[in-house]
Amino acid sequence: MRLVALFFLLSVTFLAHPASRQCQSTDPSAPDYQAPPLFSPDNQLKTYIGANYSSTLPDGTTVLTGNIDIKKNQLYVHADKARYDQQKDFLQVTGNVHIDTPSLSLDASKATFSLSNSANQGTFTHTKFILPAENKKRSISLKGTAGSITTGSNHISTLHNASITSCNLNSPDWLINAKKITINHNKEYGSAHNVIMRFKGVPFLYTPYIQFPTSNKRRSGLLFPEFGTSSSRGLEFAQPWYWNIAPNMDATITPHFMAKRGIELGGEYRYLTKSSHGSLHGAYLHRDRISQQKRYQVRYQQYSTIMPNLSMAIDLQDISDKDYFNDFSNNLNITSQTHLDRSARLNYDTQDWHMRTLVQKIKTIDTSSPLATRPYARLPQLTLNGETAVGKHGIQFTLDSELVEFRHEDNNKPTGSRITLRPGFYWPLSGAAWFFDPAIKFSHTQYNVGPDNGSKQRIEDRNLPVSSIDTGLFFERTLSNGLVQTLEPRLYYLKVPYKAQNNIPLFDTSIPDFSIAQLFRDNRFIGGDRIGDANQLTIALTSRLINPVNSKQSMRASIGQILYFNDRRVSIDGTTDSRRQSDIIAELATQAGAWSGNIDLQWDADANRFSKENYLLHYQTDNRHIFNFGYRKRLKNNTLDLQQTDTSLVMPINARLSAYARWNYSLKDNKNINTITGLSYDNCCWSLQLLAQRRLQNSTTDNLYESSILVQFVLKGLGNIAGSKARHTLEQSIYGYHDILQ
């Protein structure tokens, strides 16, 4: 730890991160930058000089007084007095001196510089300066003062007894003070010697040397360190080092000290080419002080466009153990993962046809789970699907096809291949107020399976016709407030004969959650191992409120139910469903100004109660005014399975101070799931975000909680000096929030 701190003090390179917004207030104490004139190629060697009075001395020197303006290509000078040596093309100016160049703007008491070269070599005394944001693609301008500034012909400026900040120069909240600061305008970075960094006038860091960017251009070096604390890791300190390998690739290497765990080495490599982009992320802890084991995480992702219609995607990831995410992440979406996808895809797409090759092996994070419960691997899966017009009457030919080979870790599980062919035709007919879409498909499925001991078992081919009719009407009327209300009744009839399928293994088949979309699917199962028998009619009704000016919907409501004319004998568990009607499913989405809401309901018609309820109320005018309230309830096998509330908000306390909160609570278990509270302060040159989080560890059943304090401290123009975990946590936890404090 001492070596890390000593290294940090001896040589530090700060890399700025782009600020997300520019301070709207102006600084009257800073130079008033105006872009210098840009002359045409024919006039770039000319110099234009204007003044109230001028005189010429016997030695040829011109003396100018009163309201002096000097314009040259990419240079503007204003002063009260000037002496111009035309033979040497040398200029001395005094009194209210102001100079604008593309990379530097300054006010000075006096200046001496040459007009004979584009670098404007010279010396400027008692200066205030600004590095313009407009010409450097920055959101925040760096500015400061210097006893003197010397500019050279190599586009390097040297500042003596200088200070730099992004704050108001009269009362800066933070400053970099240095004996000497050198700015390379071409390479867009600065370096400083004998540096003291101050915040609110209090020195908090000394280093003999630092580097910092003057634009958003990437540069190798140390990033600001990250600090934090948590109950599972203790006090944390991470020191990222950024490596700008090439214009199209970079890497970040991060030693991470955790008081309770040890020192972890993390890193991320990114690359970008004309046809590909990808990243490699990983972390390794040789010996965890708590578990006494090696801990690691690795993930490689790549997407490539091989040809205009041919693309490839790779996602490979692994972790050392089932508790890794719980111990090293603050994100509930990550800690709740139960499986890791490891796959490679090759996609060929045309306008009407799509072909995919997939190799996939999903890792179960909990290695103690029984082998038989783990998902199958697809080694490989080939699919071809699409449609094309047949003849001139609008009839469409469709094809869904698949060839897949299944493998499993458990040698006692059946494995083998499945071939599926589903050719079909549909005829979309429609008018101004109606549509009528009859369709017919023929599903052929062929298996060659057996246990993983080499013997194969032939399963009888499954051949089933699937026919359907989808039809509906459109009615609309104009309301007194100018909105258009629609009424859209819809009927969907599906006919699939019964065929016994209990001898077919379940490789990838499951039952999806019931929803409006599920009312109109031609198979109640997901996956190819079951095709549900059906003789059913879906009745649905949708109504919308539409603004005719911009076609935006302010309300959409849908309700529907399936009526069954026969028992459903095909199932996953071998049971028969004899109900004559499905649950009633209803959805409502509204939008009124900054308010929006969503309601999803599922009514059990047999038990006369809701089996699923989802409510969401959302309010947002900007990233400082957000309110969310959600409620979820779900029954499983007529037993309460889930009942939660989720409340979050972002609320301004005053112009600079904001409050954050999230409370995710389980009513079923009477316990908190995730609680976040915090404050942020934001002004024109720095921001601070402080969060406290307490979340339930998902991989345990002992109601263990992880508590942490997350900090993001940003010196605008330089970047984060306390990490970005607070920002990531808020963006992932509060619906609608995007960070604005960088």
Image (cartoon, rainbow, N blue to C red):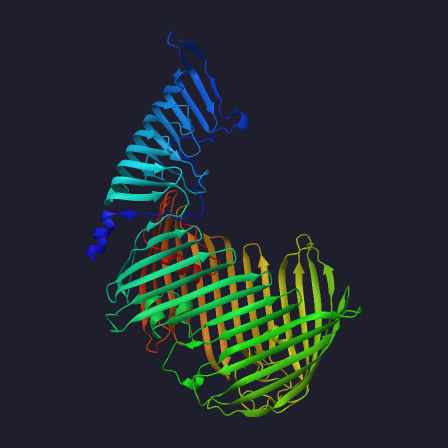
- Say whether residue 728 is left or right of residue 439: left
Residue drawn at x 36%, y 69% as measured from the top left:
325
Residue closer to the observer: 690 or 241: 241
- Report x, y in % for residue 385: 64, 73
Q: Residue at x 38, y 67 (%)?
A: 298
Residue 124 is left or right of residue 531, and the answer is: left
Compared to 216, does 404 lie above or below? below
Q: Is residue 102 left or right of residue 42?
A: left
Q: Residue 313 vs residue 671: left or right?
A: right
**Location of residue 641 in the rendering, given as x and y in whole percent from the top left corner:** 46, 79
Query: Can you tell which quarter of the image residue 560 is in?
Result: bottom right
Residue 503: x %, y % from top left: 56, 92
Q: Residue furthest top?
A: 58
Q: Quadrant of residue 42?
A: top right
Vertical relation: 496 (above or below) 144:
below
Location of residue 69 (image quadrant) = top left
The residue at the far right in this view is 392
421 vs 471, nearest the viewer? 421
